[in-house]
């Protein structure tokens, strides 16, 4: 497969979501010559920066600055472009302007694959809002009548990445991606997120479990680490069913 024409778009609610849930996919695409772009809607400055708020004298703007630096460094480590929107946190502010900017991102970047949050997450409404926003933006970007200087979008597949509490989010993985070749890169990106060090080992364990599943379901014992995804739209093929 020629990855030079592939464009992976990841829409992340908060500063670190894309690292925990899809860092391996991003690194894999980038390593194979594809463009990878992350849209980070919020810094998670209120709800996902507990480690920072425990420090004396911390301010909201300082938290945002730190999370921006962490996300930027992590994206660079993975080989991705990143844009941070600062759209607010707890709650995420889904405004008409934000919708418009996301539609234009879809139009200008022309992704061949899209990754985002599950539409159900009882622990974090910002994740649900991001999922809905992403799905709507993709549909709007497909509409030929939507005003834009860029051409309308085709039909890139969309995948939900694995949430923190899978069973509570109605997540059913039907794609397991082998990230073994780039797992150390993902680890380096995770270690950029100093505000949430408690998740470093957690997501290492998740990758190991999914790697075990990947090896068992493929018969390939070389798969050690993996990420799980759920397909939104049917796969369309003119070849054999796989």
Image: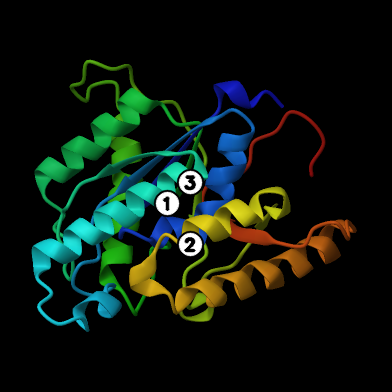
Place residue 2 in its image quadrant. top right
The residue that appears at 56% across and 21% down in the rendered structure is: 5
| 18 relative to 205 in the view: left or right | left
> Can residue 194 be seen from the camera position used here?
yes
Indicate the quadrant containing the N terminus: top left, top right, bottom left or bottom right. top right
Place residue 123 in its image quadrant. bottom left
Q: Nearer the viewer, residue 225 or 197?
A: 197
> Can residue 231 be seen from the camera position used here?
no
The residue carrying mark 1 is: 74
| 188 relative to 58 in the view: left or right | right
The residue that appears at 55% across and 71% down in the rendered structure is: 203
Residue 232: x and y, percent?
51, 51
Q: Is residue 7 above or below residue 186?
A: above
- Secondary structure beneath dot 1 equals helix
Q: CA–CA distance between discs 3 and 2?
A: 10 Å
The residue carrying mark 2 is: 190
The residue that appears at 26% across and 66% down in the rendered structure is: 126
Q: CA–CA distance between discs 1 and 3?
A: 5 Å
Q: Is residue 158 above or below residue 216?
A: above
Label number found at residue 44:
none
């Amino acid at each position: 497969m020629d990855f030079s024409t592939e464009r992976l778009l990841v829409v992340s609610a908060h500063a670190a979501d894309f690292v925990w849930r899809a860092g391996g996919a991003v690194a894999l695409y980038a390593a194979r010559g594809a463009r990878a772009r992350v849209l980070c809607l919020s810094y998670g400055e209120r709800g996902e920066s507990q480690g920072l708020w425990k420090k004396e004298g911390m301010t909201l703007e300082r938290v945002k600055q730190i999370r921006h630096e962490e996300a930027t460094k992590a994206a660079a480590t993975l080989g991705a472009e990143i844009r941070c929107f600062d759209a607010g946190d707890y709650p995420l502010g889904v405004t008409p302007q934000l919708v418009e900017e996301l539609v234009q991102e879809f139009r200008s970047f022309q992704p061949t694959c899209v990754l985002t949050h599950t539409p159900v997450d009882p622990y974090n409404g910002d994740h649900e809002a991001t999922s809905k926003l992403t799905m709507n933006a993709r549909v709007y970007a497909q509409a030929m009548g939507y005003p834009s200087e860029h051409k309308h979008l085709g039909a890139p597949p969309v995948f939900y990445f694995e949430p923190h509490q899978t069973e509570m989010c109605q997540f059913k993985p039907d794609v397991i991606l082998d990230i073994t070749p780039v797992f150390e890169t993902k680890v380096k990106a995770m270690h950029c997120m100093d505000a949430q060090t408690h998740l470093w080992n957690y997501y290492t364990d998740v990758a190991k479990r999914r790697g075990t599943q990947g090896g068992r379901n493929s018969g390939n014992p070389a798969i050690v680490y993996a990420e799980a995804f759920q397909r939104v739209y049917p796969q369309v093929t003119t070849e054999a069913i796989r």
